[in-house]
Image (tube, helix red, strand yellow):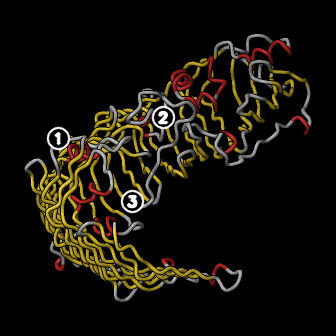
Amino acid sequence: MSNISFNMNARCPDHDYKHASFEIENLNANVLDNFVKGYLKMSAGPGFPLDAGLKAKFNLADIEKFYPVQGMELSGNLLADLETKGKYLPAKRIFPQTQANITLANGSVQTKYYPHPIQNIQVNTHITDNGGSMKGLHVVLSPVSFVFEDKPFSVKADLKNFDNLEYNISSHGTLDIGKIYRVFALKGYNVDGMVATNLSLKGKQSDAVAGNYAKLNNSGSMTVKDIALSSDLFPKPFIIKNGTFRFNQDKMNFDSFKATYGKSVIVLNGALSNVIGYATKPNDTLQGNFTFTSDGIIADDFMAFANSSPTSSAKPAGPSGVIMVPRNLNLGFSADVKKVKYNGLELTDAKGQMTISNGSIVLKQTGFTLIGAPVTMDATYTSIDPKRATFDYHINAQNFDINKAYKQVKLFHDIASSAANAEGIISLDYKLSGRLNSNMQPVYPSLKGGGVLSVEKVKLKGFKLFSAVGQRTNHNGIDSGDVSKVNVETTIANNIITIKKTKVKMAGFRLKFEGQVSFDNALNLHFRLGLPPLGILGIPMTITGTESKPNIHLGNGKKEDELKETEDDDKDN
């Protein structure tokens, strides 16, 4: 390296960093026949005022002559010319005025990871922003092209006014992205598959949003095959087996898109809109409507951190993470799924309308079969971060087997713990909201709601609570019997289930009870045992302790017997 020279000045006239400034002028360096020239002036005031320029000319093949580039061979002629001046205030959408030209002619990249190079790389890029704003930004790619494995690929783009994007994009060629990945062998990632493009996109973002489709000229297609994508948010690769994107004005149509995730297989048909805005602006929303069909979905596979990373066979310890929902999506689905498995539950014949919007999944009048019973549900699920989520649902399940529900549905097991020794048919109409922890399990102090458990016809066997009542009152035989036409109304808040006054006829006795049950199985029930024949004479009592070890106190209870509430601290637990 030769002819290295520059002038540097740095100053801060007082102790306030906002008055500091830094300058490098007359920067010059030569390497063989290559050179770098430039200057940089900046200060720490509001918007970090900047004035900089850079000119460079490099033959990339010369780099290895003065700097060791291990495992890689480069070639091509690189020219860069950049000037920028102004303030950087992104919150006010103020940017430096910029002029930049970058070209690469006849470039190639050869690495030790793959036997063939990416060659004939041509890059011609012009960036201008004379107004120092997103509106004045103009980016031209004319073109970017290369050849890999004898397959040419090129893309041209002319992008203006990023406040109301005016675009003109065309792309032709085939990409074997799996082999391109292996050229660079980025450790910890895995990409594979083929993409073939033949498309032309031209128009304004505002016309697409306003529905002025006659002013757009978007056409062409992009075909994908065996694409495997991995993301930090999802523990398994998302594989697109095959499918074709067709571009028609503002829409990107999906034709028979077949994809797999773990053991889940889905088929999508439908269309996306605002694709250009979504691709070019970080906060723009992708919109669309689809029909969604599948023979089977395993929802557990979609939980963040659910299994090991794609490059590791070891399973991590600790929580798995919630299902993450992107916030810049507004998608509608008409779903028809034959089987869904989630947290040990198996739902069959799931049909309904689903919307993904602003980080939430909303189900409306979704019907499915659970443990052999028809269920309809309205629900909202929102992911807060990878370890927390909230839910709100209304479920209506008619005539289901109470014993199956107790054994197979954990939340029912916890809410209706007394169903352990019951057989028969019940119905449930319940609203519930709350928070899910990093294992996608409900945080019980966060649960709020209420509803009715309707007993159609149930046979109780050895019901411990009633057995304890019988022993304490010397009236045995009330722990077993048939119960029918009973509605048990409850509310839930702060880890407590509150049971409203309920009347039950069983084994000749007339029972009345109300009170509290905690999710820790603690009891505080006010109970009256009405004696045969008509229950006019009765024995009042208070039941505390737990369901497995109840304490029976004859007489009415006291205020201090009420169970202690537990408020949700909104932390992952």
Q: Identify residue for label 3.
A: 329
For the residue marked with disc 1, what is the amino acid?
A: Pro
Instruction: Looking at this view, name the residue that lies furthest to the bottom.
Output: 131
Q: Identify residue for label 1.
A: 115
- Considering the numbered disc 2 on the image, is that residue within a helix, a strand or a loop? strand
Residue 268: percent from left, percent from top: 25, 47
Q: How much space separates mark 1 and mark 2, taking CA atoms?
A: 64 Å
User: In which quadrant of the rendered view does residue 208 lie?
Assistant: bottom left
Task: Tell me if label 1 and label 2 are in contact, CB under 8 Å.
Answer: no
Classify mark 1: residues with Cα within 10 Å, few (<14), some (14-19) or many (20+). Answer: few
Q: Residue at x 10, y 56 (%)?
A: 152
Residue 155: percent from left, percent from top: 17, 65
Q: How much space separates mark 1 and mark 3, taking CA atoms?
A: 40 Å
Side of 361 where 403 appears, left or right: right
Quick check: can you spot residue 293?
no
Side of 393 where 347 appears, left or right: left
For the residue marked with disc 3, what is the amino acid?
A: Leu
Q: Residue at x 34, y 56 (%)?
A: 332
